[in-house]
Image: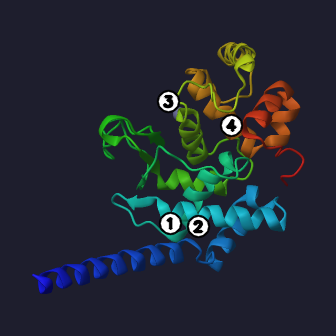
């Protein structure tokens, strides 16, 4: 009996040791230095990163690495390269950079398709207009992006759009449970109605053809929020000039002031 007990105790100790070793390894993983290649890709291709000071760049790069380490990025009929991982992660970090401890609670995988796809995730056929989407149902917690569009969003330096940032803004919006264009965690209760008034005023201008905001923003409140967020992060100076009211609210929602910094 004593022998059995000793064996059991020994086994228990072994299991404990094993668990401790695993934990140590995980901790080690978390503090790995950011690869130089990530920094290079960020410096070359991500204007948002270029305008940050050195300390902020360090924080940004760390968060990019953390996102890549904690989120699967999978290619569907395409090969995911390092540049894709860095661009996906940068798109995730940009809208949440004003929140130092931000963790996305609603994503665990990003699927990259070579190009646009349709509602049934088919890549062939005529209705292939979707360039990015946040999944629902069986695709809950999955984001789908066109690889071509992902790269294009960063290559085109003068546009007001960036599909990957757009999709991550939907996830930010969804943090409070609903993708409705009202990010409740960031808007104090008494600011919700004024925000909705502004949203509807701007949507009306789009529908009347009197706006430089992408017409897709008039689809509904959620799309409006994602579309103007792209504009805010891609062309902050232009947004501030053309829509100072919108720029002001978005600055307080995202806790960032990108205008005056981007080249
Ligand atoms: Zn959208």
**Disc 2: which residue:** 65
Residue identifier under label 4 = 229
Q: Secondary structure at mark 3?
A: loop
Q: Give the distance between the C-alpha atoms of the residues marked 2 and 1, in whole angstroms.
A: 6 Å
Q: Position of residue 127 (x, y in %)?
A: 37, 35
Neighbours of disc 3 within 10 Å: few (<14), some (14-19), many (20+): few
Q: Which mark is residue 177?
A: 3
User: Of callouts 4 and 3, which one flags the residue occurring earlier in the amino acid sequence?
Assistant: 3
Q: Secondary structure at mark 1?
A: helix
Tell me whether circle 2 and circle 1 mark residues in contact (CB < 8 Å).
yes
Tell me the quarter of the image containing the C terminus. Answer: bottom right
Up-down: is 190 above or below 41? above
2 or 3: tag closer to the N-terminus: 2
Determine contact: label 4, label 3, CB under 8 Å.
no
Left or right: where 6 falls relative to 139: left
Density class for disc 2 (Cα within 10 Å; few <14, some 14-19, many ≥20) is: many
Between marks 2 and 4, how big is the CA–CA gap?
A: 23 Å
Q: Residue furthest front?
A: 2
Write down the quadrant of residue 50 in the picture.
Answer: bottom right
């Amino acid at each position: 009996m004593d022998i059995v007990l000793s064996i059991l105790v020994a086994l228990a100790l072994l299991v404990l040791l094993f668990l401790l070793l695993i934990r140590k390894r995980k901790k080690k993983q978390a503090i790995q230095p950011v690869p130089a290649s990530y920094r290079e890709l960020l410096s070359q291709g991500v204007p948002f990163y270029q305008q940050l000071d050195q300390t902020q760049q360090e924080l940004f790069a760390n968060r990019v690495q953390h996102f890549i380490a904690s989120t699967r990025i999978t290619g569907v009929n395409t090969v995911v390269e390092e540049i894709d991982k860095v661009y996906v992660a940068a798109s995730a970090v940009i809208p949440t950079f004003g929140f130092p401890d931000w963790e996305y609670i609603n994503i665990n995988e990003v699927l990259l398709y070579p190009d646009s796809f349709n509602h049934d995730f088919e890549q062939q056929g005529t209705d292939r207009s979707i360039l990015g989407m946040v999944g629902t149902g069986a695709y809950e917690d999955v984001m789908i992006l066109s690889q071509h569009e992902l790269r294009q969003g960063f290559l085109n330096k003068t546009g007001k759009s960036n599909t990957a940032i757009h999709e991550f803004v939907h996830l930010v919006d969804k943090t409070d449970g609903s993708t409705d264009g009202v990010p409740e965690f960031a808007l104090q209760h008494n600011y919700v109605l004024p925000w909705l008034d502004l949203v509807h005023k701007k949507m009306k201008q789009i529908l009347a053809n009197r706006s430089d905001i992408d017409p897709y923003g008039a689809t509904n409140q959620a799309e409006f929020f994602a579309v103007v967020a792209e504009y805010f992060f891609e062309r902050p100076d232009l947004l501030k000039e053309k829509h100072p009211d919108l720029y002001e609210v978005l600055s307080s929602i995202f806790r960032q002031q990108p205008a005056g910094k981007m080249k």
